[in-house]
Image (cartoon, grey):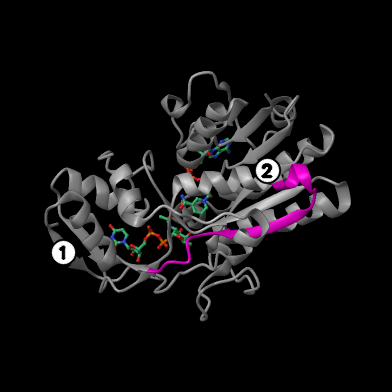
Amino acid sequence: MALYLITGGAGFIGSHLADALIARGDRVRVLDDLSTGKRENLPRGAEFIEGDVADAALVRLAIQGAAGCFHLAAIASVARSNEDWLGTHRANQTGTVAVMDAARAEGRVPVVYASSAAIYGNPDRMPISEATAPSPLTAYGADKLGSELHGQVAWLAHGVPTFGCRFFNVYGPRQDPHSPYSGVISIFARRFASGEPLTVNGTGEQVRDFVYVADVVRHLMGGMGLLQRAPQAAVINVCTGRATSLLELLAALERVCGRKADRRFGPERPGDIRLSLGDPAKATALLGLHATTRLDQGLAATLGLV
Ligand code: NAD
Ligand code: UD2
């Protein structure tokens, strides 16, 4: 029974990870400032510390006795990173350095951390493999890329093993649907369930790689297992390799719910990316994992139908 620290563990992905670790018999300690996370997301038995991940002294305290740290705390809204450049930089990159520095002080605790497909920007070749040159277009993407560089330094200069997960479009229960910048599946699921119209930005032909949160959790736990067996610094895509257009997403929602959606077409979102499709080959080679949840299954779970 090992103890794991999860920063951002009261949020969407972190709380599913906390559930899975506790179900496996591990102990969980969560550090979260509850800026977007919720206390009620935390499973019974999880220890909770309320505070800022960029507060170095607090992170040092929080990591004490941990066999590993999953660092997921971040301001996940790209729009906010553009509005509050310096404030989000503190959470999204200084926070990462605080975690890795505390991991060093605690005796080289392995760190698995959240990166993002946003580090790639808008590449012209699909699917996107890890060999694609990073070219972030936003402060959020720049801070995630900076976090990866610090992840490499943590290992090379300080012997702290690190594993970065470049999440593509994650979806599932507990994802906040309430902001216009929320993930499209959480917005569509909420509006569909309450009978409100769904607005498609542009033609609906834009493509994403939607990965279900339980598959993401398996990658995070697999990454920790890898670091414990073979300390190193690595980064992987966390994606399915399956392309879904928004029109296909709508069709899947209608199939799962057995009724038609009230769909409207609005203007294209400024700066919207047309295609985003990840290559999962490296994750499979390193971890022996695939994101196996099919879109229909994942949507049914997101809508609370299973
Ligand atoms: P989320 O907002 O639900 O979770 C983030 C958590 O971090 C929240 O509980 C929030 O309260 C906490 N937090 C924010 N700033 C903090 C701070 N300064 N100190 C302590 N806690 C803080 O979002 P999520 O979707 O679960 O994202 C988890 C991680 O995955 C983030 O690092 C995010 O950038 C990354 N990510 C998510 C997606 C996605 O599709 N959801 C895609 C790429 C990357
Ligand atoms: C996500 C992130 C983005 C960046 C990117 C990296 C969010 C909200 N956005 O953007 O910041 O990290 O991934 O790959 O996390 N859409 C509609 N109607 C709606 C809502 C969205 O048509 O009501 C469209 C939107 O214009 C886009 C697609 O759905 O074409 C997906 O939108 P998203 O915001 O869920 O995700 P994405 O990939 O654009």
Q: Is residue 255 left or right of residue 135?
A: left
- Residue 122 vs residue 80, the one in the foreground: 122
Q: Earlier in the sequence, mark 2 or mark 1?
A: 2
Foreground label between 2 and 1 = 2
Seen from this angle, which residue lies furthest top? 45
Residue 285 pos. (x, y %) = 65, 61
Could you tell me which secondary element the residue under label 1 belongs to? strand
* Residue beneath the point at 53% across and 76% down: 123
Q: Amino acid at mark 2?
A: Met
* Image mark for residue 221: none
Q: CA distance from mark 2 to mark 1?
A: 43 Å
Task: Locate the C terminus and report the quarter of the image it occupies.
Answer: top left
**Residue 103 x/y as whole percent:** 77, 37
| In the image, the residue with mark 2 has its CB under 8 Å from the nearest atom of ligand 1 | no
* Image quadrant assignment for residue 140: bottom right
Q: Which residue is mark 1?
A: 264
- Look at label 1 and name its amino acid: Arg
Is residue 300 in sight in this rendering? yes
**Residue 194 within the segment the image draws in magenta:** no
Q: Which residues are magenta?
A: 226-243
Ligand 2: image quarter: bottom left
* Residue 224: assigned label: 2
Residue 195 screen position, x and y as percent: 13, 47
The residue lying at 46 percent from left, 44 percent from top is 214
Q: Residue at x 24, y 45 (%)?
A: 190
Q: The N terminus lies in which quarter of the figure?
A: top right
Q: Is residue 235 magenta?
A: yes
Q: Position of residue 177 (x, y in %)?
A: 32, 45
